[in-house]
Image: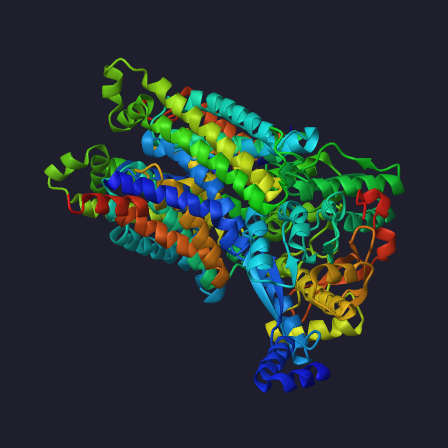
Amino acid sequence: MKQNILTGVLLAVIALLVALPWFAPYFYIFVFTEILILGLFAVSFNLIFGFTGMLSFGHAAYFGMGAYTTAMLLLHLDWPLLYTLVAAMALSGLLALVIGFFCVRLSEVYFAMLTLAFGMMVFTIAHSWRDVTNGSDGIAGFRISEFGLGLDLVMGNPAVYYHVTLAIVVIAALVLYVISRSSFGLILKAIRQNPERVAFCGLNVRSYRLASFVIAGIFAGLAGALMAPFLRVASPELMHWSLSAEPVLMSILGGTGYFMGPFVGAALFVLLETWITSYTGAWMLFLGIVLALMVMFFRKGVLGTFLDWWMNKND
Amino acid sequence: MSGLGPALLNSLEMGLLLFVIAVGLNIVFGVLNIINFAHGALYMLGAYFGYTLISILGLPFWIALLTAPLGVAIIAVLIDRLMLRFIYDRDIADSLLLTFAIMLIISESVRSIYGSNIQAVYPPAILDGTVSLLGSPYPIYSLFVIAMGLIILAGLWYLFNRTRVGKIMRAAALDRDMAEALCINTRMVVTGVFAFGAWLAGVGGVIAAPMRTIDPGMGEKIIIESFIIVVIGGLGSFPGALIGALILGAIYGFGGRYFPEFNLLLPFLGMALVLLFKPTGIMGKGANA
Amino acid sequence: MKQFNAKNLMVSTVTAATLSLGTGNAMAEEPIRFGAIYILSGSAATYGEFAQRGIDLAVEEINDSGGILQRQVEVLYEDSQGKAATAIQAARKLAYQDNVDALLGLDSSGVAQGMVPTVPELQKPFIITHAATPDVTGNLCNEFTYRISVNVPQNQKAAAMIAAETDAKRWTTIGPDYAFGHQTWEYFGNYLKEMKPEVELMEQTAFPRFGAEDFTPFINGIMDADPEGIIISTWGGDLVNFIRQANNLGFFDQGYEVMFTVGAATEVLDALGDQMPEGVWLSTRYWYDAYDNEANTRFVEAYLDEYGSAPSYNSEGAYAAIYAYKQAMEAAGTTDGPAVAKALSGMTMEAPNGTVTFRPGDHQAMVSPNWGISGPMHPEHGIRTLTDIRVFDPEEVARPVEETGCTL
């Protein structure tokens, strides 16, 4: 019963999101495009953090890889957007495979530190390899000439780009949801709770960790690939550790225990930032206080705290 | 290679300053099992307290060196009692996140109090100027930094190996439950250790103040360097912090001089290499995979 | 208007009253809004503060003297956090949500690089007041984007002209390891080589990472290489660190020709006091003591009066941008975005740094870089003075439009 209500709410939210350009102020098209992209980024991150229990501090490397792939393919080869997205997912996944191969051997804090180190190496390469990446300025000045599949979409129109983003993010989220609900996803959860026991069952913990790391990298790459045309630029800051911190904050804010938690967190994060920076320059201070309170008292996040309360009510 | 001598001294200076800061991070990790993201912010607080005492109130540098770190330690006690105690028993990820939040709060509070201007503190007259060492001019203040680093190194060694307090700290680091069973008030130890780590960060901040500009972003810069050091040396290891700091100092000192085009990449490369071959750091205990 | 009211009066006095009130109010009370995007948090926030000072000063002056097109002026600030993504969203918010009439801002080249391509969508004019990357008035230029501040090629042409006059033959550089540092060296080197083919541009250069704090290894490395001239583009807090450490190492006693491209920034001079050595070449996008004109006298006096310190170049750029908008809006007779953007093209104005023209070909302001030699301390302002001040002819230092890559 309650499950059905939740599904209904979710569908209603998606319907509202589809209709958004027709009723919301124009600026909110941009706000929600950003929420969707960062939401996908955070959900992909939560696949390794919330489900597999590994705190990655270098997730922006794959996000940035996706952004650079799209930006460079659009700039140099003028590919249709859809193809660049596929290429971005492939390259980000490859990068995650290489980095993940080394990182998943380590546990907890060492894993966090090594992902941070690799993330910053990728950042440094993007920042320093001026011939290819245009250094700190990043890749700008590209445009989308077509979407692909023969669809006639005016990608320069923010509302169209918003709808494209919405469609892709919903599909990607569905895929991730299916993965997290599959037996594979259940094993990941088991690894988080008790890796030794999973190993005793004859499963190779390391391979499962690596697989989840790569999947997370692929979808982070997709999010980044959507970000570059939205921002009109791919720059090294998209790979910096401070951007790696964002999906962590969003996941904590929304709740790591539920699939939709990071989406809720991304929405809260972006909306609060948009509103608060209008009134004061102290956004970071506010963020710090909110984050501290969440970690200390509401570790399940906004969505998690609410759902746990609601699910247990009347039961 | 006439510049080898100065490069060596320079590396030593940077390494020892980084040691003073990073060792606090490691001591806290050893006993509390917390990675303190706010450690850099505490270093920055030390520098700002030093700046307040020296440049605003006109007090001598030595008074600031004695009192400013104590101020940082007091703030640390507040942080521990008001915030950290809620997450003692949780995952390491929670401590990273909470201290990350604390870092944001401290940095932005300092910025709103002091403004974001570039501030400078001048070294005391006795440490100002240069001497000729190994054929090149060398700042006296840098020699002072090296001396301070060595004094703190010796002091910490004495503390851990020769005093009761140090033994209690080591006991608490090894097994908190056992320590408690032996009638050690571990709550006091935990708070005390956190404050002590913050005190070290504060000392680092005051020492750094006359040689580096002071701005609210300085904590964020140093924390990543401190992470690199403790990871290279081994998390929670006292000698590891020294080795890690000296390695990073050498990477900066020699790398900046002889491979300037790789100065961005080298620290992270070093960190990744160590973790690949010895995941727990050079002085780390056992495998943790 | 009168006729319109009279006509309505016959139909219904009530409607007429509301109508005339409505239109009248819109004219008299709805202020003109500017959206300003600067770094307002983090370690470079001091630059945003300086810009704010300049803007607030200009707005106060304009509002006291009747506003623009008889309307009052107000400014909305947004924090770019030094990130392109944040700045772009801020610009969209200002344009679509807050309905500002014009935009100005940007401290960082990377941010400018990202944001400029999005400006035409907003249909609002945008004046860059600080970021110096050549591309935004080069291959990324567009009809809505202008820059009132000095860019890298302008300043490096001037620097090369000075360098060519000196006896130094072997030149190298120290600069931050990002686009600004590298571009400075490339433009400086190319211009200098052109003017004086016998100079040697050394292989040994130093690009410490931005925020490096300890520059000693780099300074030692450069001193070992024994150059004759050095162009230094390190800036802000890094520059303060650099100079204090260079002093200790005797860097300034070696007889090098030393040129600091952003060395005369007042925030740096303030922090350094007499630790800034005498006898080195310092430049800035605007030096408050370099211009003898009415606009500058008024600006410097008002600034000293209000804030008690010598004005920073970033304050001047932001201040002048507001006046540029005033003039363009009055010329266009409207605040309509495309019309104001069009009015800016080719417009000439009297700014504190002299007569400034926005070149139609690339929208770069023809402004004059200033260089001078650091002299004795200023008795009141607590910073070094500049002597032998050189104010360069804008036409002489600007890239020809054909070379910018801009096709407007």
Who is closer to the viewer here, C10 or C328? C10
Residue A149: give x, y in percent of width and height.
Answer: 60, 28
Who is closer to the viewer here, C125 or C192? C125
Who is closer to the viewer here, A81 or B38? A81
Residue A127 vertical placement versus C303 (above, below)? above
Residue A50: give x, y in percent of width and height.
Answer: 33, 34
Task: Give the farthest residue toward the top.
Answer: A202
Q: Is residue C42 visible?
A: no
What residue lies at 37% left-to-right and 39% top-to-bottom? B23
Q: Is residue A54 left or right of residue B130?
A: left
Q: Is residue A276 visible?
A: yes
Residue A263: give x, y in percent of width and height.
Answer: 40, 42
Q: Is residue C101 left or right of residue A39?
A: right
Q: Quadrant of residue C212?
A: top right
Image quadrant containing the C terminus of chain A: top left
What residue lies at 49% left-to-right and 55% top-to-bottom? A24
Q: Is residue A20 left or right of residue C119?
A: left
Q: Is residue C324 left or right of residue A2?
A: right
